[in-house]
């Protein structure tokens, strides 16, 4: 027979009869060790074994990562962060959140309306360990947001303005240090006869035509600022936009921070209509 709840309580009381209040609190703190971490602009209260859905991280399934922005560990509150504290977790999978329905109605454009959905990209992680100190010596790679990692890669690929300026100044100094000797004119030498100008032919002196570039502002919801962003990313024609697939839309939306504008304003459909000559 199973003992009654009263018998279980009495057995627990007898087991802990010799423990002081401080010792008992120490046992409970060890069992209920928790931390408050910050990632993706949000705060989470976690303990070992918890499953979390956080903003997308630059990590694959099975990777072990470490959250170094810890605001609180147990009863220790940081100012604002707890020095040396960290939360380690294992990446379970890259997932998407629940679909959010967005209804858009435009009165100025033929009273059109459109219903669209959005699913936020998330990372599912399982908390494995909470470190109160020694986070810098753990050897576990820190958790980095996918967008932050992409921006860091872009900035690393492009040379900084100061480095380019220093290189230009260095090249200018070298050119100034070694001036080329000027050739002295020979007074006895006869001036060479001027060559006759070749007859102009149609199209010969015309400058080379610039690469084809469409006016992307014809797309609804796309102004000069967004056109400049797209041109900076190498997108200059309607044909490029019409050829986008779902993965391209997600990648470009995250890279240029368009906040779902591609799907909301149906740029792909408008671009297809413009390229086919229907509009």
Image (spheres, rainbow, N blue to C red):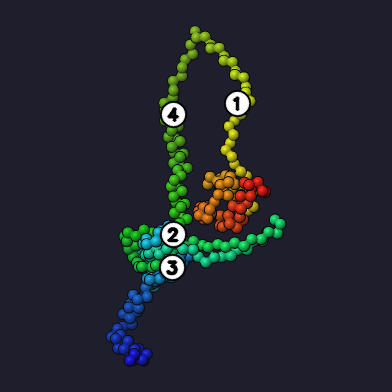
Residue 207 can be seen, yes or no: yes
Tell me, yes or no, whether the two marked residues, 4 and 3, touch with CB atoms within 8 Å.
Answer: no
Query: At which x and y percent is residue 241?
Result: 57, 49
What is the CA distance from the residue labelled 3 to the residue labelled 1? 67 Å
The disc, 3 or 1, on the residue closer to the chain's N-terminal end is 3
Report crowding for label 2: few under 14, some 14 to 19, many 20 or more residues within 10 A (C-alpha).
Answer: many
Q: Write down the residue under mark 3.
A: 52
Q: Position of residue 102 (x, y in %)?
A: 60, 63
Left or right of 217 in this view: 50 = left
The disc at residue 57 is: 2
Find disc 4 in the rendering and name its residue. 175
Q: Which label's residue is closer to the chain start, 3 or 2?
A: 3
Using the image, tell me which numbered label, if any, was put on residue 204.
Answer: 1
Q: Secondary structure at mark 3?
A: strand
Q: Is residue 15 above or below residue 166?
A: below
Q: Earlier in the sequence, mark 2 or mark 4?
A: 2
Give the Cα distance between marks 2 and 1: 56 Å
Instruction: In the rendered structure, find residue 177 and report the number of the disc placed on it.
Output: none
């Amino acid at each position: 027979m199973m003992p009654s709840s009263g018998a279980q309580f009495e057995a627990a009381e007898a087991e802990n009869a010799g423990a002081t209040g401080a010792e008992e609190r120490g046992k409970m703190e060890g069992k209920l060790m928790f931390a408050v971490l910050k990632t993706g602009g949000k705060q989470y209260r976690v303990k070992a074994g918890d499953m979390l859905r956080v903003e997308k991280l630059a990590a694959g399934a099975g990777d072990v990562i470490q959250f170094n922005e810890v605001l609180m560990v147990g009863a220790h509150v940081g100012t604002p962060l707890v020095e040396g504290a960290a939360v380690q977790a294992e990446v379970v999978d890259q997932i998407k959140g629940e679909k959010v329905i967005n209804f858009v109605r435009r009165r100025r454009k033929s009273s059109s309306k459109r219903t669209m959905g959005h699913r936020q990209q998330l990372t599912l992680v399982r908390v494995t360990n909470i470190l109160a100190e020694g986070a810098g010596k753990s050897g576990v790679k820190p958790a980095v947001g996918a967008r932050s990692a992409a921006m860091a890669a872009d900035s690393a690929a492009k040379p900084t303005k100061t480095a380019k300026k220093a290189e230009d100044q260095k090249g200018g100094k070298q050119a100034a240090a070694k001036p080329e000797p000027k050739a002295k004119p020979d007074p006895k030498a006869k001036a060479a006869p001027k060559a006759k100008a070749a007859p102009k032919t149609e199209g010969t002196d015309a400058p080379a035509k610039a690469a084809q570039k469409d006016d992307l502002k014809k797309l609804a919801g796309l102004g000069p600022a967004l056109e400049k962003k797209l041109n900076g990313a190498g997108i200059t024609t309607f044909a490029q936009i019409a050829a986008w697939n779902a993965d391209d839309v997600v990648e470009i939306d995250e890279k240029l921070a368009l906040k779902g504008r591609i799907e909301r304003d149906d740029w792909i459909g408008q671009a297809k209509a413009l390229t086919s000559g229907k509009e």
